[in-house]
């Protein structure tokens, strides 16, 4: 794609990258908004301003939004901006860039930023996931301590058949509850051959020798498994007894 075919906002990202080395990174939301106001032309700002807010922010998620995430959040050169958003309870790079662009749009349209409402909307999304993951992690550690190498265990996994073949999966937070269906879901009987954790003592795993499966036509996480195989299982979200 040639530069002339890019939207004004995307084209100016090349300029942002050049000028960024000559300016300090913004340390808060106010400085982030000011950066765009100072480095975009009036026509570019008006194009953004005159779009409906949701469309304006969504359209730039992989343009200016991606540039924000790569150069201000993930770059690792200065943590002041991420520390600022951390203090507000906002941690995900996508959420940070969306708040910056939403706030820019509202500033240009002389609207109240309603920052508290923006923050609460993202917290409402993430809080159930965070709480669910804490419960899963605690249960994983409990199961890790319940069993020792050489123990026989039974693993229950839901099976997804939506793409035409059977694949045993994990349900991710926050919706992890499911009822075992004997006709559809997978039952694995096996022997724990190894216990270990990676980086965090709560990030626990079993290596299990597969002794039997109630269905032989079922992959586990898109991987073919058969009796006698050694399979690594994360205990996070794994239903075992």
Image (tube, grey):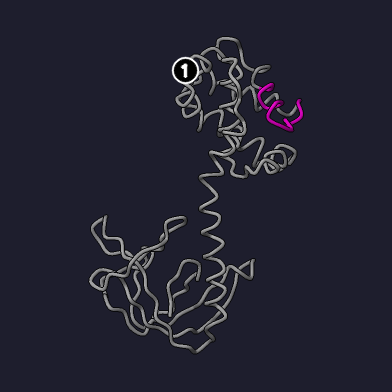
The quarter of the picture where the C terminus appears is: bottom left
Task: Tell me, yes or no, whether the highlighted magenta stretch contains residue 209.
Answer: no
Name the one closer to the observer, 236 or 229: 236
Residue at the spot 57% in from the left edge and 80% down from the top edge: 145
Residue 177, picture quadrant? bottom left
Looking at the picture, does residue 28 appear above or below residue 6? below
Q: Secondary structure at mark 1?
A: loop
Report the side of 112 relative to 218 (left or right): right
Residue 119, picture quadrant? top right
Name the one closer to the observer, 132 or 144: 132
Report the side of 221 relative to 79 (left or right): left
| Total numbered circles | 1
Q: Position of residue 140 (x, y in %)?
A: 53, 71
Residue 159, picture quadrant? bottom left
Dot 1 surroundings within 10 Å: few (below 14), some, or many (20 or more)? few
- Residue under label 1, please give it: 51
Residue at the spot 50% in from the left edge and 84% down from the top edge: 193
Residue at the spot 58% in from the left edge and 32% down from the top edge: 99
Q: Position of residue 206 (x, y in %)?
A: 51, 77
The quarter of the picture where the N terminus appears is: top left
Residue at the spot 56% in from the left edge and 44% down from the top edge: 123
Q: Position of residue 77 (x, y in %)?
A: 73, 40
Looking at the picture, does residue 45 appear above or below residue 216? above
Q: Position of residue 137 (x, y in %)?
A: 55, 66
Q: Which residues are magenta?
A: 23-35
Task: Tell me, yes or no, whether the highlighted magenta stretch contains residue 24.
Answer: yes
């Amino acid at each position: 794609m040639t530069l002339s075919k890019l939207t004004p906002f995307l084209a100016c990202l090349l300029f942002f990258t050049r000028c960024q080395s000559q300016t300090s990174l913004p340390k808060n939301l106010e400085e982030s908004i000011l950066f765009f106001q100072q480095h975009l032309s009036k026509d570019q700002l008006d194009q953004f301003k005159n779009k409906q807010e949701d469309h304006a922010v969504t359209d730039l998620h992989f343009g200016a939004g991606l540039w924000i995430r790569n150069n201000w959040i993930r770059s690792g050169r200065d943590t002041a901006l991420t520390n600022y958003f951390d203090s507000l309870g906002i941690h995900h790079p996508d959420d940070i860039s969306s708040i910056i662009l939403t706030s820019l749009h509202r500033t240009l349209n002389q609207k109240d930023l309603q920052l508290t409402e923006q923050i609460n909307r993202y917290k409402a999304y993430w809080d159930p996931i965070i709480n669910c993951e804490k419960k899963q992690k605690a249960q994983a550690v409990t199961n890790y301590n319940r069993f020792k190498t050489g123990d026989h265990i039974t693993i229950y996994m839901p099976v997804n058949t939506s793409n035409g073949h059977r694949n045993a999966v994990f349900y991710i937070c926050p919706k992890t509850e499911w009822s075992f269906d004997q006709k559809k879901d997978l039952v694995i009987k096996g022997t724990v051959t190894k216990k270990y954790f990676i980086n965090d003592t709560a990030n626990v795993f079993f290596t299990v020798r597969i002794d039997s499966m109630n269905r032989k036509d079922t992959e586990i996480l898109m991987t073919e498994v058969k009796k006698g195989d050694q399979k690594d299982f994360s205990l996070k979200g794994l239903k075992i007894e």
